[in-house]
């Protein structure tokens, strides 16, 4: 399908895959997706598998992402990983503000913005996640929540930095639940976010920005979601843990 922006489809493996399993998966993806040029492909393994996975994808069309990073570049932050450390493994992207981190680690928009600045300082492209809960949607607060998260998480970024930032609209009620937003609901939220970007930055930045949809994306629903004008790719959790299903999502999106 002809799209205004190049699709970017990323697999978020979350806290899954030993190194051996990660290698199995990435070798499978390499085979399945070797000829795909129309879509930017990203895999985000756990930190422990980054090193080995990076070696396998050196010579192919799959790029490496991390699932989180600390906002500072070093220091007394036990258990944390910096952008500079990620760069050692040729990591290009980093997921920031995933709803699971907002929920379980209580990450705030201010912290996510600090991380986004840290990512840009090391030339990593952040994938900044935003999305409303079911209660917020049912209370008619979707736009208000999205606006707060988008403004807060992108605070202080320059137009140039926004140009190197990906957004992911991930309604929390659709993550890992099997409940996908309808294509219409996704398109509506993406249009709203793009309008916010025009307000925060300018029309050109907004038109160029890539906004992924995430939330129970599967091979069966990928085509309809990706065919929406303002949906520029997908952030895929569960269905990215198996080479065939991730590859089918990619192929069904082209
Ligand atoms: C995610 O974790 O970003 C996600 C969208 O998960 P799933 O595809 O499993 O809903």
Image (spheres, rainbow, N blue to C red):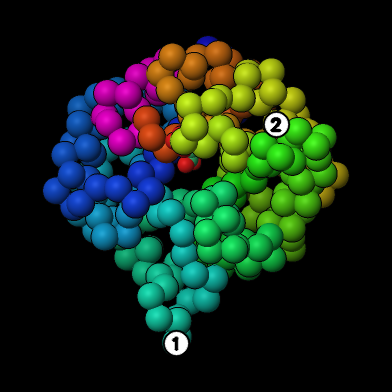
Question: Where, quadrant-wise, is the C terminus in this rendering?
Answer: top left
Residue 46 in view (yes/no): yes
Q: Is 64 situated left or right of 69 in this image?
A: left
Q: Is mark 2 within 8 Å of ligand 1?
A: no
Residue found at the far bottom of this picture: 76
Residue designated by label 2: 190
**Residue at 48% across, 27% down:** 178
Residue 106 sits above or below residue 56 on the image? below
Residue found at the far right of this picture: 199
Q: Is 156 situated left or right of 251 in this image?
A: right
For label 1, the SS is: loop
Q: x%, y% of residue 163?
A: 64, 47
From the viewer's side, name the closer residue of 172 and 123. Answer: 172
* Magenta-colored span: 240-254
Residue 157 in view (yes/no): no
Q: Is residue 247 magenta?
A: yes
Q: Which mark is residue 213?
A: none
Residue 227 sits above or below residue 108 on the image? above
The image quadrant that residue 247 belongs to is: top left
Task: Tell me the chief SS of the magenta region.
Answer: helix
Residue 118 sits above or below residue 32 on the image? below
From the viewer's side, name the closer residue of 182 and 133. Answer: 133
Residue designated by label 1: 76
Q: x%, y% of residue 94?
A: 47, 54
């Amino acid at each position: 399908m002809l799209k205004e922006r190049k699709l970017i489809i990323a697999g978020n493996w979350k806290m899954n895959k030993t190194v051996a399993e990660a290698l199995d998966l990435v070798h499978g993806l390499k085979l399945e997706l070797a000829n795909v040029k129309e879509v930017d492909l990203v895999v985000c393994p756990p930190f422990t598998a980054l090193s080995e996975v990076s070696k396998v994808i050196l010579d192919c069309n799959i790029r490496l992402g991390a699932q989180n990073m600390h906002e500072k570049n070093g220091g007394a932050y036990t258990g944390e990983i910096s952008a500079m450390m990620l760069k050692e493994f040729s990591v290009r992207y980093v997921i920031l503000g995933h709803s699971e981190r907002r929920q379980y680690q209580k990450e705030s928009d201010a912290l996510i913005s600090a991380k986004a600045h840290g990512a840009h300082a090391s030339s990593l492209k952040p994938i900044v996640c935003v999305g409303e809960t079911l209660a917020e949607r049912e209370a008619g607060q979707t736009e208000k929540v999205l606006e707060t998260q988008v403004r807060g998480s992108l605070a202080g970024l320059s137009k140039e930095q926004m140009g190197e930032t990906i957004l992911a609209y991930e309604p929390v009620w659709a993550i890992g639940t099997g409940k996908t937003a309808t294509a219409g609901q996704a398109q509506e939220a993406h249009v709203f976010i793009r309008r916010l970007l025009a307000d925060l930055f300018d029309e050109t930045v907004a038109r160029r920005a890539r906004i992924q949809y995430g939330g129970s994306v599967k091979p069966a629903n990928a085509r309809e979601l990706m065919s929406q004008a303002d949906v520029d790719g997908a952030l895929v959790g569960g269905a990215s843990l198996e080479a065939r299903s991730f590859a089918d999502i990619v192929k069904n999106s082209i």
